[in-house]
Image (spheres, rainbow, N blue to C red):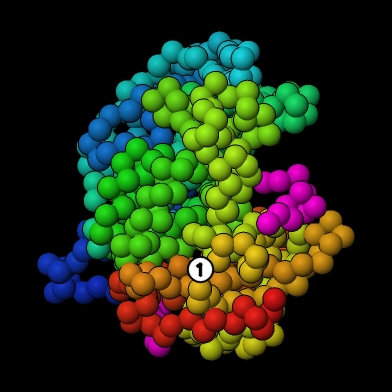
């Protein structure tokens, strides 16, 4: 996120949205995803009483684990004891999660106050372990670990159980670096210090602390609904994180599609190179947010610390002049490398709130939505947005699918949804709005009335996203779908 719009102005037939139907005689041919989704869900996964932050909170010693590998939880609570329940997010007949494990009672205690690394203003909890958790029998997926304290209060700890392979699968690439960048637990994030000022922000943030609010807020807002829909569709899925892609780029090998969720701002150069390489090898890519791949970061402490000095990059001890690896914006010097060369669109700014306006209504993305050219969906564009910027590196041919007029801090502009293909056959889609995944929840009991999006918008986004996921799951889009019709000159 930038500090406002002014700062950002720098150079066929597609499958149904319904759940798959299975008969007992077909059981032998069910995929692991279909078997898992046929299990009964547990609709009580939501928090009912978070209480004060001190009531119960916790974090894990790993962002993701391989199936069967253990992890450690660190919990602080004012209650005498607590339990932990592991909920795997999915469709599950509408329950949207299944409890795969529950701990016994664990004695509670209040852990020490946060520790501060003064040189970088990094907050670390530094707590003692509360319990070791094994994951035998846990399928790959996105998990919410719910802490239930005996004082009646609850919090989440998010965890990804990552897939050992993405070959032939749609890979959901979760964004914990961005979760951590915005995390204000202990009073500091990469955006502000305890006094709310940018000048006192952290220069590096640690995973060794709980997340603020519910404990999993950015996952719940920008990623959960996407997981639920993808699992409902029954397509072959795999799970990973941006940190895992940074460490092991070979994880992308053979994936039919890579999915970047609703807010995926913080990337390393290694992650970006891996995703670009996968695209060029034939993997489709979908960017379902805005402001994607905007900040250039590095990891340290074995991946437990996210470093991003931003405008103070020259003070970063890890910066080596001439390498182009400064922990600042990808588009900024030194080593400017605008994200549009990968995403097709360029982040422009925030805040805005505007209707999403369909233009290429005959595109396969919109099949079955009933949308016509000029139809609009109120509030779907926001709070940050991207647009096609011809002066920036932009793959061609590129087709603008939606071109939505907006005003951002008094300046008129547009948000664009865009689609392009590359010689490998890979298709790349960018929604151009940070609210796309939120739109999947519009008009449901999970949307909390956010932004005023209605059920009509929810149905539109759900069908369009279903079209995208099912089409991309069939392999390189450029080989089986109509090519993009370059229309940039029509709009710019």
Write down the residue under mark 1: 395
In this view, which residue lies farthest toward the top? 112
Highlighted range, magenta: 1-18
Q: Camera-side residue: 399 or 128?
A: 399
Mark 1, secondary structure of its residue: loop
**Residue with the most extreme front position:** 322
Seen at 42% across and 63% down, the residue is 285
Is 280 or 300 nearer to us in this picture? 280
Above or below residue 375? Residue 424 is: above
In the figure, 19 relative to 331: above or below?
A: below
Image-quadrant location for residue 241 = top left
Residue 154, percent from left and from top: 54, 33
- Residue 365 percent coordinates (x, y): 49, 79
**Helix, strand or loop: magenta stretch:** loop
Q: Is residue 282 left or right of residue 153?
A: left
Question: Is the residue 424 above or below the residue 205 in the image?
Answer: below
Report the residue at 70% width, 76% height from top. 492
């Amino acid at each position: 996120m930038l500090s406002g719009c002014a700062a950002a102005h720098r150079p066929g037939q597609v499958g149904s949205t319904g759940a798959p139907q299975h008969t007992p005689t077909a059981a032998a041919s069910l995929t692991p995803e279909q078997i898992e989704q046929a299990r009964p869900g547990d609709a009580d996964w939501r928090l009912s009483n978070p209480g004060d932050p001190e009531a119960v909170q916790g974090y894990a010693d790993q962002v993701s684990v391989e199936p069967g590998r253990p992890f450690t939880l660190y919990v602080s609570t004012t209650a005498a004891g607590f339990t932990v329940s592991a909920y795997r997010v999915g469709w599950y007949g509408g329950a949207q999660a299944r409890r795969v494990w529950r701990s016994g009672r664990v004695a509670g205690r209040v852990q020490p106050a946060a520790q501060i690394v003064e040189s970088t203003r990094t907050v670390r909890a530094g707590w003692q372990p509360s319990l070791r958790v094994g994951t035998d029998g846990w399928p790959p997926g996105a998990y919410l670990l719910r802490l239930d304290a005996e004082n009646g209060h609850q919090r989440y700890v998010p965890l990804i159980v990552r897939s050992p392979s993405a070959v032939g699968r749609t890979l959901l690439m979760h964004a914990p670096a961005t979760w951590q960048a915005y995390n204000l637990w202990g009073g500091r994030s990469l955006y502000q210090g305890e006094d709310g000022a940018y000048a006192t922000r952290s220069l590096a943030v640690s995973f060794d602390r709980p997340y603020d609010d519910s404990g999993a807020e950015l996952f719940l807002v920008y990623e959960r609904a996407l997981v639920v829909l993808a699992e409902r569709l029954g397509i072959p899925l795999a799970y990973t994180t941006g940190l895992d892609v940074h460490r092991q780029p070979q994880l992308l090998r053979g994936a039919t599609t890579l999915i970047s969720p609703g807010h995926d701002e913080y990337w390393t150069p290694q992650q970006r190179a891996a995703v670009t390489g996968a695209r060029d090898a034939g993997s489709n890519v979908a960017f379902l947010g805005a402001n994607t791949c905007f900040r250039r970061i590095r990891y340290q402490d074995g991946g437990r610390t996210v470093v991003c000095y931003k405008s103070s990059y020259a003070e970063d001890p890890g910066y080596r002049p001439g390498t182009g690896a400064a922990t600042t914006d990808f588009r900024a010097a030194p080593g400017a490398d605008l994200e549009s060369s990968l995403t097709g669109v360029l982040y422009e700014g925030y805040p805005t709130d505007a209707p999403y306006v369909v233009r290429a209504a005959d595109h396969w993305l919109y099949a079955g939505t009933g949308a016509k050219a000029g139809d609009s969906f109120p509030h779907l564009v926001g709070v940050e947005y991207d647009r096609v910027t011809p002066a920036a590196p932009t793959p061609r041919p590129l087709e603008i699918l939606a071109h939505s007029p907006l005003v951002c801090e008094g300046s008129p502009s547009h948000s664009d949804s865009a689609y392009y293909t590359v010689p490998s056959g890979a298709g790349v889609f960018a929604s151009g709005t940070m609210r796309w995944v939120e739109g999947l929840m519009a008009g449901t009991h999970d949307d909390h009335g956010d932004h005023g999006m209605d059920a009509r918008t929810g149905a539109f986004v759900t069908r369009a996203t279903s079209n995208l996921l099912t089409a991309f799951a069939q392999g390189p889009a450029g080989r089986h779908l109509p090519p993009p019709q370059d229309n940039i000159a029509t709009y710019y």
